[in-house]
Image (spheres, rainbow, N blue to C red):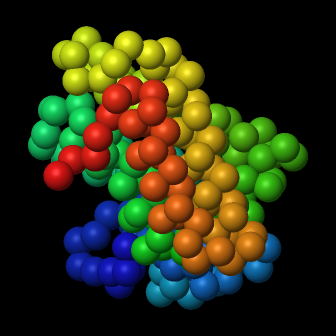
Amino acid sequence: MADTPDRSGEDPDEAIMRATYRALSTHGYADLTMQRIADEYGKSTAAIHYHYDTKDDLLAAFLDFVLGRFKDAVHDVETTDPEDRLELLLDGLLVKASEHTELLVAMLEMRAQAPYNDTFAERFRENDAYVRYLLETVIDQGIDAGAFADADAEHVARVLVTIVDGARTRAVVLGEETALSTARRAATEYLAATLDHRPAE
């Protein structure tokens, strides 16, 4: 997401999303302004307002953009093996998240606004539901295929999401550098105990 925002032929909406990412990573939610996004975009605020009426509209679109990129990454996973797919999902949620700590900070700031912002709350609920759906689906597939022991897939998925959310919060709020790697190990241990699961070699 570090590409320049004014590449020839780039879709304006995607360019604005990339600019928003960079502005959020640099300034955080509290200090984010349309002007700072425009600075990253390389154009005037009027050019952004042509596409988005308010900052909240833009940030709601940004949340959709982030979720869309996550969905694309999941769909690009070629393996259908449930054990491997579950490993890759957890890597995406925890291991790769460590490569974007500034974005984790900004997203946590936006989460903190959700109780007061129905638009943000709706996006975060949709994101949470989608992640739980992915996890639950692959767990059910593994149970059906005999790769996993019988278990309550919905409950297991909720536990995994709780591990992910807790680790991301600790990483941001406490600056705990090992939070994500600890959570990844904890998730593996929990799955081994719950599903007779073993990490892929």
x and y percentages locating residue 26 in the rendered image = 60, 85
Rendering quarter of residue 151: top left
Q: Nearer the viewer, residue 6 or 72?
A: 72
Q: Is residue 140 left or right of residue 50?
A: left
How many marks are shown on the rendered structure? 0
Residue at point 45%, 44% (across, down): 189
Q: Nearer the viewer, residue 96 or 27?
A: 96
Residue at point 75%, 70% (across, down): 173
Residue 163 lies, with reference to residue 177, above or below; the image says: above
Q: Nearer the viewer, residue 177 or 189?
A: 189
Residue at point 79%, 73% (across, down): 30
Q: Nearer the viewer, residue 110 or 33?
A: 110
> Looking at the rendering, in which quadrant would you find the N terminus?
bottom left
Residue 96 lies, with reference to residue 4, above or below; the image says: above
Give the residue furthest to the right. 116
x and y percentages locating residue 14 in the rendered image = 39, 63
